Structures are given as C-alpha cells and as structure tokens.
Amino acid sequence: MTNTTEKQAALPNSLPRPPGEKEELLRIWETPSGWRWITAVNNTVVGLLYLGAAFAFFVLAGLLALVMRTQLAIPENDLVSQDLYNQIFTVHGTTMMFLFAVPAMEALGVLLLPQMLAARDLPFPRLSAFAVWAYIIGGGVFFSTVFYGLAPKGGWFMYPPLTLTEYSPGDNADFWLLGIGFIEISAIAGAIEIIVGILRTRPPGMSLDKLPIFGWSMLVFAGMIVVAFPAVILATMYLEIERSFGWPFFTAAQGGDPLLWQHLFWFFGHPEVYIIFLPAAGLVSMIVPTMARRPLIGYRLIVVALIATGFFSFGLWVHHMFATGIPSLSMAFFSAASMTVAVPSGIQIFSWIATIAAAKDRFRLTTPGLFVLGMLFIFTIGGLTGIMVAMVPFDWQAHDTYFIVAHLHYVLVGGMVFPLFATFYYWAPMLSTRMLSERLGKWCFWLIFIGFNVAFMPMHISGLLGMPRRIWTYSEASGWGPYNLISTLGAYLIGAGVLVFIVDLIRNFRVGQGGQLNPWQAGTLEWLSADLYSTRSIPQVSSREPLWTQPDLSEEVDSGQHYLPNAPTGARETLVTSVIEAKPQYVIQMPGNGWAHVLAAVFTAACFLLLTIKVVAPALVCGVLAILCGLAWVWELDKGPGKGPVDIGAGIELPVYVSGPIGHGWWAMVILMVVAGSLYLSYLFSYLYLWTVAPKVWPSDAGGLPDLKWPALSALLFTAGAAFFAVARRTLPAPGHPHLGTPLLVLLGALSSILAVYLAVGCHWQAGLRPTVSSYGAMVYTDGILTGQLVFTVLIMSLFVIARHFTGKLDRVRCATLENTALLVYYTAAQALVGLVVIHGFPRMIL
Amino acid sequence: MMKASKNPSSKQAVGTVLIALIGPLTIWALHFSVVYGAHHLVCAALAGNYVGFGMQTTVSVATVAALLALLLLIVKPDVVLRMKRDEAMPKNSRLFLTDVMRLLALLSLFGVLWAGSAAFFFPACMSLV
C-alpha cells in the first residue's frame, strides 16, 4: 500500500464518492432566483445582505456627520437649524451604534463563522434571516425619520427628563424607543444563533483550545448581548410606558428618578463599546497571524483577555455618571473597574505587537495589514484617553466636552471601523471572484487614517478649551474656530477614503463561488474550497491552523473525504458536536428557504412602527399576523426522527433527532431564559433603586397592601402550572398512540399560570393601588407586565404543543416542542415566585 | 459501528466549561455587586458615625472572601475543576481549561483587590464636592 493510499484509508470517507452526490448538495442548497431571493436562509446570502445593509447605514450616518462638521466648520454658522442639528446628531449616534456597529459584527458572525467552523450553516438559519429582515425594515424606517422632521432629538442616549413627553412632545422620541427596542430584539436573536453555533457546530477535533480567536470573540460578544441588551430594553419599556401612559418611573415629583435611566442605559451602553470592539479584536487576531505568517503569540492569554474584558466591561457603567453627584466611594469602585479593564485590553495589544514583531520574514504591509497597524495606533490612543477619563477629577474637567467626543471616536473607529475595513479587504476573496484592489486599498487606508487623525485629534484640544459636545454653533470669541475647521477638513478626507472604498467595491467585487483559493496563505478553515453548501465535507481538525498543518486538507474536503460529504436525509443538514472536544453527536435537519420568517419580520416591524404613531388596532392585527407567521415557521422545525441514524463517515452513525439538553433547541431556550433573567434582574435593580431614592412613596402601613392570601394563592397556581407541565412530559404517549392526558395537562398548566398572573396583579388593583400615582405603583404593575408577557408566550406555545399533539407530531420520542415549552414554564414560575416575594415581602419588611 | 458520544458527558462538559470560563469572573462580579449594592443601600438606609465603619467592614469581609475564593482557584484548580476524573477528556483540553481559569482568577484577583481597597481611602457616603 502506498503512503497516499494509506492516508486516504485513514480519512473518514474513501474515494470515489458516488456520482451525483455533489450535484444533489448543490440542488439542496441552491439560492432561489429572482424575487424569491428574499426567502433565502443560506448564511452566505443572509450574511452578505446583513453586512451590506450595515455598511449602507454606516455611509448614511457618515453623511450626517459631514453635515454636522460643515455646520461646525466656522463660528456662528446657520447651515442647518438647531432643531435639525439635534435630530442629526441623535440619528448619527443612534445609527452608528445600533444600526451599524452591532449589526455589522453580527453580520460577520453569520457570514464568517460557518466557514471558519466548516459548518454547512449555523443551527438556526431562519432566525438569522428573520433578524436581518427585521433590522433592515425597522432600521430603514427609523433612519428615514430624519428626512421628515420626526427623528428623535435627545442624543443617542436619550436622557430623561429631556425625553419625557413634557419636554419632547410628538412622536420623535417614540421612534427611538420602539424602533431601537425592536432592533435590540433582532440583535438578541442573532446572538442566540451565534452562541449555539460556536459551541455546537464546530468540526470534529476542533476542541475549545483550537477554536479560532474570532470564534472566541463572537462567543463573548453574543454572551454580552444576551446579558446587556435586556437592561436597555427594560429602560425603553419604562420610558415608552411613561410617555404613553404616565407611569412615573423617571418623574422625581412622583418618586421616580431620571438617573434610573442612566443606570440602565449605561449598564447596556458601556458594555456596548466592548460588544463592538471584541469581535473586531477577534478579526485582528485572525489577520495578524496570516500577515505575519506565524501562529498568534499568546492564544490562551487572548482568550482570557476576551472573556475578562467582556466581564469587566459590565462593572464600568457608572463611570458615565461621575458628574451626577454620587458618593466618592461608589465612584472609586467604578474608577477601579474602568482601569482594570485596561489590563486585558493591553494583553491583546501586546500579543498583536509580539506576533507582528516575530513575523516570519517581515509583517506583510498589505491593505488589511495597514488597517491593522492603523487600528493599533488609533485604538491605543483612545484607550489611553479612556484611562484619563476613568480618573474622576479629570472626568469632571472633560465631562460632556469635545474631549469625550474625540475619545469615543478614537476607541470606536480605531477599535471597530479600522478592523472592519481590514476585514473587507482580507475576506473579500472568500466571497468574490475578484480581489479588491491593493492600490485603491492603500489610498483608502491613508485617506481614512490621515483624515481621522486630522478630524479627531484637534477635538481633544477644543474639548479641553471647554467646547461642549452636541453644541449647534458657537461664538468666534470662544477661539474654537480653527480647531473645528481642521476637524471638518479631516472629516471630508475620511469621506473621500470611504468613497475610494466604494469605488473599489463597485469595480472589483463580484459575488460568485469565491476567487483565488487562499490568496493570503492563511491557516484557518474559511479558506477551504467552498460552495453554496459551505464545504463539501466537514473536516477532521487537529490544530489551530489546519491549512498550515494539513496541506492536502482543501483537496480532501473538496473531494468529500471527510465527514458528511452528502445529504443523507435529502435536505439541508449540519453536524452537531460536543462542547469541549467537538466529538460528533448528531445531525441537525435544517430548514430551507421560506416565506414565514420574512413575513414574521415584516409584520413585527409593522406592529412596532404602527404602535409608535399610535395606530393601535392595525398594530395589533400586525402583531397577531406576526405570531401566526412565527408559528408557521416553527411548525416545520421539529422534523422528528423519521429519517433514522445516518452514516457520516469513519463508521460513525449519528441520530438525526435528539431532545433534551443535548439538542440545539434546548440550548436556544436556555439562552432565552438567560435573556429573560437579565431583564428581570434589571427590574429588581430598578425596584430597589427607586426605593432608595424615594422610600416615602412605598407603602407606609400594612393597610395599603393586599392580603397575603392572594399572593400565596398565586404562588400555588404558578407552582401547579409548572407541575402540570412536568407531569405532561412524563405522560407523553408512545408514537402512534395519542391520548388526551398530555394536551389536557398542558392546557391546565397554561391556564393555571394565567390565573396566577391575574391574581397577582388584580389584588393590587383591588387594594386601590394605581400605576400612575407613584413610582411604587408603576414598579408593582411592571412586575405584572414582565411575568404576564412570559405567561402570554407560554399560552401561545401551549396551544402550539396541543396542536402538535392532535396532528400526531408529539410523542415520547418526538418531544422537543414540549420540552422547550416546559423549560419556559419552569422559568416563568421561578421568576413569578421571586416577584411575589419581592412585591409582597419587601414593603412589609421595611414597614 | 461507532456511536455518537452520550448525553451525560455533555452535561458534565457544560458544567466544566462554565466553571472554567466564567467561574473566576463571577466571583469578581459578585464582589463588585456586594460592595456597590451594600454601599448604595447602607448610605440610603443608615445614618451616623457607624456608617463608615460598617462600610469598611462590609467591603473588607467581602474582599477577603473573594480573594480567598480566587486564590483557591489559582492554587488548587482541581478542587473545583474535577476534570481528572473525566478520563475521556484529552490532556490538552484539561490544561487549556485549567490555565484559562487560573489566568482569569489572577485578573479577577487584581480587580477585587483594587475595588476593595477603595474603602480605606474614601469617606463612606460623601460626595467629593
């Protein structure tokens, strides 16, 4: 036997593969043509659409920045009115943060992760597609408000009391609140997809210590979204409820506090900076080794740095509030945390520098390489000024001045935009038949790099000279004119750089089956030969840079010699592997193209947007239609075990249906529970915070509180609801032998939960408490809303489970739907019990 | 025929990963929540000369407890990360997870120490102004 033959025999599948296998894969994964293209769920199509939309928002927000800079170029300018200027800076900031930065990173996750993991797709492709369409529709409508005077004017962080109805009448602020709240939900959907995808769809052998750094960074990124975003969703709920119904969360006269908004907003808002930066750092950690032609130095340290940065970033939120008069000891905690986060950030910077310094031959100064070096320079300056403003006395000096504008742009543009441009140039050949131009790329880099420093370096000085941020115009006597003129010139240079990139894109980007294979000679799997189905077969991996250590891997994969080279169920599938070692566990049967998720996104967006302009009845109709579309979409997901175990190669037979903790649906539900838990923790924080601010509006005697028998009965019913579901799980019928016990128990469980919420909320109403009178009342009824919305979801899911039962799609084997619903029921019961203890126990405890 | 890996190892694996990757930083987060939460509530609810002493004591106790827990993770990682019993797990994965946990514990240790020391330099409930 020759060496080649021995090697082939050691691979999971031998050659030749049966004829027609590759053609069948192409047929199954085909992208629909014409107008049906919008039904596509393939990660490459959806990822490109996502990234394209995010870049379009970047360009639009950049144009608004140019208008602002033109307005500020000379003193006492009146190019735009003050009112329009307020709208422009609000929409610029909001668009850059919510419609560009986070979606661009999620888009890169959807686009790059399946290729890096050699997965056919991420596990919930329709969820990604839903998130994209929701984002495009919602974001498009939000951005367009600036053209007809309906854009919000309160700055991207929308502080009350400025944004309360009293000071911001009209619908402008509502567009921010409902639009952004909705887009955050889309971001959470993407995050769930990314977490489950990274942990469960890695190729065999890619143990956690071999996961590409971009995978680690996206894991931390998605985890941070899951924990951080609920805080701002709750804050936007509070503000919208106060604006629409007068519940006083932020009105001091009734026991509210505007600072509650700042706490919740910045609990999201500061991690948001790292949510944006960490994936970009992951991208840099992928590009640097390729350009240095050697493995990244300090892989473990970078993993540690990513996780630590993600955590520490949650301990910093109050450093945005140093000027609000909080006690010095609290400020010290947050100042310390702000400085602590510099340590893991520094670890990454030094690791990149070390890898560049240790480059084989010399670090390649290609366009992606230049953008990485530009990022190192700019982000480091932003980090250093960040340490400056982490110190309380300096922060008081620089607070709300252009120094802060300079700092945040150095961090965000250095930390995210430069890596993004490096990404465009580096990964374009993976998707395009032609590489982007190196010559134009270098023009693009130098224009943006020089333009950025010309634009933002002078802002440090104008800020220290006292120029406030968000100012519409200024007097000549201030002396800020020359600095602003230089900044404006720099801004136009940046614009020219972006224009060069767009020209390059138009001239050279041709979507196809990829261009020159691995033009940078990179080591990671996204540079394998790929097609509509991602890689022909899913490779066995044995190192962090498989293409460097397994030189024949691309040919082996392309000829189908690795795992799952075919489509054994006749539909779209991918391999699910174990969390640590990436051992094959089962084969997911994935959904294909469809309309349901697109329509669900359209109706969800319509519901939120109609609510914004107070057109309630059509909004509710759209809400119902969105739910129906969602149910139609989910109906197809639980495909059951009908196809039986399938052979993936190397003699391994895997099931195509699992339930319980091993299943990817179970994982998604657990992450959703973390989202709900984070939201509820933010609520508990709000409750205790408002009590410390205004204890006088809490009940002063037992007479104001409902009798304890009502919460006790409610608790009993919540527990009973959970118990009904637990029993229902055990009484599932054998396949083909349905009985009425299971649907009856499910229905009883749902009804118990509904009655429990009714009692929990109704007893306060009976006791005379009204939500509009004080912050105490508002907080009590908000607890009811938070639990009520979970119970509403439980009801919908229960009816869905019952329908599955009566159509023969639920039994003791095919039970993922019931298991996932039961998980939500258990969580709901647990949250409700905590709520009852707090709502009924805490006021009695402080009496 | 080989079979896919069984479910129980998945559950164990999830626990191991969670402890290694977020255990040390959870201690930091708990310490941070306790000292900030206690400060917020104590200053709102109490008054008088005992507030400063109470805060210093609270912060000290929380800090020492967190430091001891983090030191345990650094010095004796096997106490919490019982991977040696999981014979199916290759050495490289064990070493990776242990190293990551130790390094995260080290970073958290500095974070806890830094925040905890603040109580000895600043007045309990007063603003600097």
Image (tube, coloured by chain):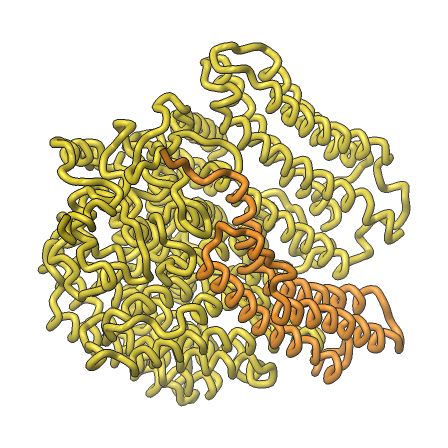
Q: Position of residue A519 (x, y in %)?
A: 14, 63
Where residue A167 sits, quadrant-wise, is: bottom right
Residue A777 rendering spot, x and y as whole percentages: 74, 45
Look at the picture and state if A276 lies above or below A226. below
Which chain is depicted yellow? Answer: A
Task: Identify whether A681 is placed above or below A607.
Answer: below
Residue situated in front as seen by the camera: A442 or A665: A665
Is A616 on the left-hand or right-hand side of A567? Answer: right
Image spot of residue A608 (x, y percent): 45, 40
The residue located at (90%, 47%) in the rendering is: A701
Near-viewer residue (A35 or A9) = A9
Is residue A315 something that shows in the picture?
Answer: yes
Q: Going 40% across and 73% down the picture, which residue do you hit?
A: A298
Q: With A479 as the anchor, is B113 left or right in this view?
A: right
Q: Residue at x 58, y 35 (%)?
A: A824
Q: In this view of the protein, can residue A186 be seen by the observer?
A: no
Image location of residue A106, percent across then percent down: 37, 53
Residue visible at 56% across and 71% down in the picture: A320
Pick the front one: A174 or A213: A213
User: Which chain did the image draw in orange?
Assistant: B
Of residues A12 and A46, the one drawn nearer to the viewer in this rendering: A12
In the displayed structure, A348 sits above or below A512; it is below
Q: Residue furthest front?
A: A1
The number of discs equals 0
Position of A611 relative to A399 (above/below): above
